[in-house]
Image (cartoon, rainbow, N blue to C red):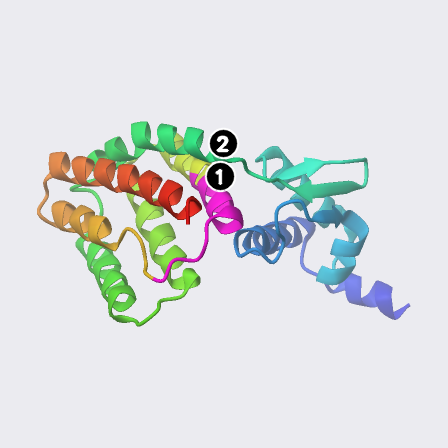
Amino acid sequence: MARKSQKGAQPPGDTLEQAAYEMLMRKIMDRSLVGGAVIQERKMADAFGISRTPMRRALAKLEGEGLLIRLTDRLLSVKLVSLQECLDAMAVRLLIEPEAARLATGRIPAPKLEELKSQLGDLTTTKNPSRDMHWALDDNLHTAIAQYSGNKAILDTVAQLRRTTRMFEEMAVPQPTWSPGTEEHLKIIKAMQRGDPGKAAEAMRVHLVVSRKNVLGMLDQ
């Protein structure tokens, strides 16, 4: 009886579904759920304290986005991203994100650029910055640029591609003792502050080329 009462007090199913989706996404991205980890709908719903219906929908959404692979009717696993999949995603990002930077220049608000610059400053002045600090800045900058490009297809595609590259880096790339990309990030921000779309696009292109090189270099370590 108590269990039924508790569920009756829960928020609507769509709210629970979104909350479960966001929590599962975080667990995948921060490696709490590693590549290949098996997920059982019922156990995951119990762990989250929700019914199976919103959990089933959240898992289906993640499966549709390619983050989960279905094993059976009731079991899924976290996708293992291969090096080739990561490189393919990086290649498409190289086609899209410089254009996003060009389009976002002049549209992204000055306070947002100052926020990004301040966040970057905190990262560069922190001794041995954590992986979480690096990804927080990376997510904020790339998402903001895609958002202010004014093109929803760019925003959605960049989000999908970045999930693929991040999953591979989290699973396969050793933790660096420095925060990669900070110099290129600063050049992107400064070009946008100056209102120079060409320079912003070029800075983004260089950043992505260097990121690819860094990933391959760290794999050789």
Q: In the drawing, does residue 17 fall left or right of residue 215?
A: right
How far is mark 1 from mark 2, CA to CA?
Answer: 8 Å
Nearest the camera: 97 or 17? Answer: 97
Residue at 66% over, 45% down: 58
Residue at 46% over, 35% down: 86
Q: For the residue labelled by badge 2, is the local secondary structure a helix, a strand or a loop?
A: helix
Q: Which of marks 1 and 2 is in front?
A: 2
Q: For the residue labelled by badge 1, is the local secondary structure a helix, a strand or a loop?
A: helix
The magenta span reads 162-177
Q: Does the magenta stretch include residue 198?
A: no
Q: Which mark is residue 85?
A: 2
- Can the viewer see residue 148? no
Whether 90 is drawn above or below 177: the answer is above
Q: In the drawing, does residue 194 fall left or right of residue 173?
A: left
Q: Disc 1 designates what residue?
A: 164
Quadrant showing the N terminus: bottom right
